[in-house]
Each structure stands twice: as structure tokens, then as C-alpha cells.
Amino acid sequence: MMEFEFEPGRLFHKNAENVVDAEILFPAIEDGTVWSINSTIVSPDLRGQGVAGALLAEVVERAKAENVKLRPICSYAKQKFLRTPEYQELEWHNQA
């Protein structure tokens, strides 16, 4: 299992050369009550290994723990939310 580093609004992994090779960006919006999943990036040598899914799963778990909603913006997150009913429970819908 890959370990990720956390910064507010960002989860990432660094390779042996200390270069970021996977990350998901989710800045807080709506006064911090929602995280907007803006991008999921995985280097070509890690693709197909479930890394993007693991990044998103950790964001979902952190969102549950902090009682925030999620807004999937990037295409990967949107597709994963469509196919994962338990993620949809956390999805934020703009009421404006």
C-alpha cells in the first residue's frame, strides 16, 4: 500500500528521487464545508496500479472524518463518483 503525504487541499506521493509522481488536489470552497476535487495526476509509470483510486479513497475518508462534502470536478473523480454509490453520499450539489 502506497503512503501519501498530506497538506491542506492536497494528497501526494514522492518517488525515490523525491519527485511527486502522484497527487490529488482538493481545495476547500464554500467556507470550508466542501472540498473541490480539481485534479488527479498519476505519472505514466504508476498508471494502472490503482494509485488514483487510492488517492481518491483517502480524500473520501478524510472528508467523512471532517464532515465535509465533495465536489468532483476532474474527469477521473467525476467518473469514479458516478460508479461508486458510497461516494455519491458525500457529493455536494450547489443550491444556487
Image (spheres, rainbow, N blue to C red):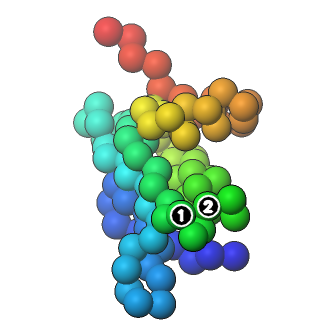
Residue for point 64% across, 37% down: 80
Q: SS class of the residue under badge 2?
A: loop
Rendered image: mark on residue 47: 2
Which residue lies under the disc numbered 1?
44
**Left or right: where 81 falls relative to 27:** right
Q: Residues within 10 Å of mark 1 (few under 14, many from 20)?
A: few
As drawn, the residue found furthest toward the top would be 96
**Left or right: where 86 falls relative to 33:** right
Compared to residue 84, the image places residue 48 above or below, namely below
**Left or right: where 19 falls relative to 31:** right
Q: Nearer the viewer, residue 1 or 15?
A: 15
Residue for point 48% across, 26% down: 92
Q: Residue 6's x, y, as percent? A: 41, 69
Compared to residue 14, the image places residue 95 above or below, namely above
Q: SS class of the residue under badge 1?
A: helix
Q: Which amino acid does label 2 sit on?
A: Arg
As drawn, the residue found furthest toward the front would be 44
As drawn, the residue found furthest toward the left would be 31
Q: Is the C-beta separation of discs 2 and 1 under 8 Å?
A: yes
Residue for point 44% across, 79% down: 14
- Using the numbered discs, state the Cα–Cα distance from disc 2 to disc 1 in whole angstroms: 5 Å
Locate the N terminus and report the quarter of the image it occupies: bottom right
Q: In the picture, residue 73 is in which quadrant?
A: top left
Q: Residue 90's x, y, as percent? A: 57, 34
